Image (spheres, rainbow, N blue to C red):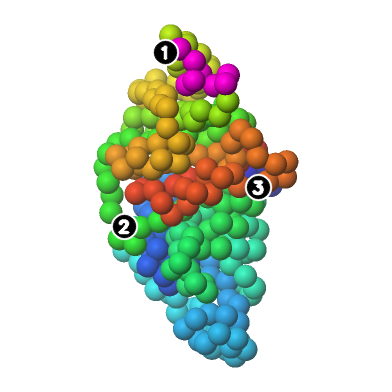
């Protein structure tokens, strides 16, 4: 699942540490994944002079570094509470968290962080770090939007597919997660009426044909993966609903939701699509955002 921008990718999971409730939940999820996959966990806390617990605008680098080291030590202990044999490394780079996390994403398996951090007005909206990393990372980004981590054990991975290259990349990534978790893969395609040629506005007889066409396209896209992992059960769900609402509902009974960074439509150069952006922090389970270059 790692990005292809680095010639020597490192098999490791990276977690952003900021001391927030969402951040601790993300750490636990990342530690569990690293343990299951048998790969190291790398923890990053980037220090900048606007850490809330030190006072906005603080320039005392000694205090800032000391706070960062304390957070990383606590995070390491929490990770080892999940798996005492887990290999955990840490780094404390200067500067903003989003820049540091995007940088290490070039050779990581995935980057994991909480939806809401300690930033200014963070409780009012999705965290800026989560948005920036999800938009610009070179590997899949996992956003944990709940404060109390618990294993749902639904044995179900949901992926949103609309036929775009990023959604096809998301499909392949989701298949890998489903195989690893021995979970069912639910492929969700939600269609909103947007014009007179939309199948939802035509006669009822056109809708079954549309569903069949989409199912065949998805089946072709995962043919190789299905051969590699024949035990993964794949279920298709084509619904007439707003994509965000459909995926939020599907997340209620899933262990993971996977989406492409961008879907059909939007403006050239846009890094994060409206659906993936609106899902950040709103799903009951962790959300994975995938870019098309990760296929």
Q: Do the residues bearing badges 1 and 2 touch, measured as CB atoms within 8 Å?
A: no
x and y, in percent, of residue 290 in the image: 55, 42
Q: Nearer the viewer, residue 86 or 187?
A: 187
Q: Residue at x 53, y 58 (%)?
A: 130
Is residue 63 visible to us here? yes
Crowd tier of the residue under label 2, counting other residues whose Cα lies within 10 Å: few below 14, some 14–19, many 20 or above:
some
Q: Residue at x 46, y 59 (%)?
A: 115
Q: Which residues are magenta?
A: 196-203
Question: Viewer-nearest of labels 3 and 1?
Answer: 1
Left or right of residue 256, residue 169 in this image? right
Q: Residue at x 56, y 29 (%)?
A: 194
Label located before the other in sequence (1 or 2) = 2
Left or right of residue 141, residue 292 in this image? right
Crowd tier of the residue under label 3, counting other residues whose Cα lies within 10 Å: few below 14, some 14–19, many 20 or above:
some
Query: Which labelled disc corresponds to residue 51?
Result: none
Q: Which residue is under mark 2?
A: 149
Task: Residue 263: name its quadrant.
Answer: top right
CA–CA distance between discs 3 and 1? 36 Å
Crowd tier of the residue under label 1, counting other residues whose Cα lies within 10 Å: few below 14, some 14–19, many 20 or above:
few
Q: Nearer the viewer, residue 188 or 112?
A: 188
Q: Secondary structure at mark 2?
A: loop
Q: Residue at x 42, y 24 (%)?
A: 238
Magenta segment: does it hold 200?
yes
CA–CA distance between discs 1 and 2? 43 Å
Is residue 289 visible to us here? no
Label located before the other in sequence (2 or 3) = 2
CA–CA distance between discs 2 and 3? 29 Å
Q: Which residue is under mark 1?
A: 204
**Looking at the figure, which quarter contains the N terminus?**
top right
Magenta segment: does it hold 42?
no
Q: Secondary structure at mark 1?
A: loop
């Amino acid at each position: 699942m790692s990005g292809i921008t680095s010639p020597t990718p490192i098999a490791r999971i990276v977690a952003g540490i900021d001391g927030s409730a969402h951040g601790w939940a993300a750490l636990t999820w990342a530690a569990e994944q690293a343990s299951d996959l048998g790969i190291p966990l790398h923890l990053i806390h980037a220090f900048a002079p606007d850490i809330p617990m030190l006072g906005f605008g603080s320039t005392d680098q000694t205090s800032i570094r000391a706070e960062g080291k304390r957070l990383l030590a606590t995070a390491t202990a929490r990770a080892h509470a999940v798996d005492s044999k887990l290999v955990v490394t840490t780094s404390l780079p200067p500067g903003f968290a989003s820049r540091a996390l995007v940088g290490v994403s070039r050779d990581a398996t995935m980057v994991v962080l909480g939806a809401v951090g300690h930033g200014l007005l963070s409780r009012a909206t999705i965290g800026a770090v989560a948005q920036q990393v999800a938009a610009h990372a070179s590997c899949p980004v996992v956003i944990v939007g709940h404060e109390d981590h618990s294993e749902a054990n639904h044995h179900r991975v949901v992926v949103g597919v609309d036929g775009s290259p990023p959604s096809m990349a998301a499909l392949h990534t989701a298949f890998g997660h489903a195989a690893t978790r021995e979970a069912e893969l639910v492929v969700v395609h939600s269609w909103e009426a947007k014009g007179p040629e939309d199948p939802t506005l035509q006669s009822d007889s056109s809708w079954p044909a549309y569903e069949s066409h989409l199912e065949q396209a998805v089946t072709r896209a995962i043919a190789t993966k299905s051969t590699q992992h024949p035990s993964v059960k794949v279920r298709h769900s084509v619904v007439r609903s707003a994509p965000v609402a459909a995926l939020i509902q599907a997340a209620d009974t899933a262990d993971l939701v996977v989406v492409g960074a961008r879907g059909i439509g939007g403006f050239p150069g846009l890094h994060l699509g409206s659906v993936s952006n609106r899902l950040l922090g709103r799903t009951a389970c962790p959300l994975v955002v995938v870019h098309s270059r990760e296929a």
